[in-house]
Image (cartoon, rainbow, N blue to C red):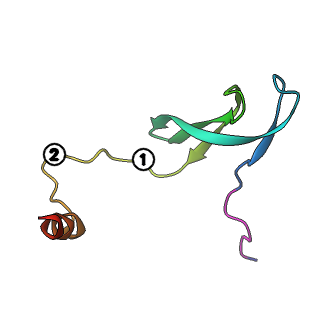
């Protein structure tokens, strides 16, 4: 049986400061070799309501010598 749901993320969490369930936004805290660490923040007061770790392959930083994508070059030509 195939997995029906890939991953869940919270859209609302209880905020003890606001004393009600509030919409949340995710903020990237750390990029680790084992994955990424995110923090959930209340959109009303900005309090931290929780964290989650998304595991996956290690993300390599873009090197300065890497060639630019063709779309970036094409876009630049259109602006000029």
Relative to 28, say whether 59 is above or below.
Answer: below
| Residue found at the far right of this picture | 19
Relative to 33, say whether 8 is above or below.
Answer: below
Q: Residue 58 carries which label?
A: 1
Relative to 70, say whether 20 is above or below.
Answer: above
Q: Which residue is drawn at 78% across and 44% down?
A: 12
Of mark 1 and mark 2, the one earlier in the sequence is 1
Instruction: Please indicate whether residue 14 sits to the left or right of residue 26 in the image.
Output: right
Range of the magenta residues?
A: 2-7
Check if mark 1's residue and mark 2's residue have beta carbons within 8 Å. no
Q: Which residue is drawn at 46% across and 36% down?
A: 32
Badge 2: few (under 14), some or many (20 or more) residues near its Cα, within 10 Å?
few
Instruction: Please indicate whether residue 78 sits to the left or right of residue 27 in the image.
Output: left
What is the C-alpha distance between the residues marked 1 and 2? 19 Å
Q: Residue 64 carries which label?
A: 2
Q: Which of marks 1 and 2 is in front?
A: 2
* SS category of the residue bearing label 2: loop
Q: Where is residue 20 in the image (x, y as percent from the top left)?
A: 88, 34
Badge 1: few (under 14), some or many (20 or more) residues near its Cα, within 10 Å?
few
Q: Position of residue 34 (x, y in %)?
A: 50, 41
| Residue found at the far top of this picture | 17
Dividing the picture into quadrants, the one containing residue 71 is bottom left
Relative to 35, say whether 16 is above or below.
Answer: above
Along the line of sight, which residue is nearer the eye, 73 or 50? 73
- Magenta: main secondary structure equals loop
Q: Where is residue 55 in the image (x, y as percent from the top left)?
A: 56, 47
């Amino acid at each position: 049986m195939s997995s029906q749901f890939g991953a869940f993320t919270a859209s609302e969490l209880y905020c003890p400061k606001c004393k009600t369930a509030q919409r949340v936004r995710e903020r990237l805290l750390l990029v680790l070799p084992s994955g990424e660490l995110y923090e959930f923040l209340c959109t009303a007061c900005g309090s931290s309501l929780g964290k989650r770790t998304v595991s996956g392959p290690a993300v390599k930083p873009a090197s300065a010598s890497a060639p630019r994508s063709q779309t970036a070059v094409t876009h630049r030509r259109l602006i000029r």
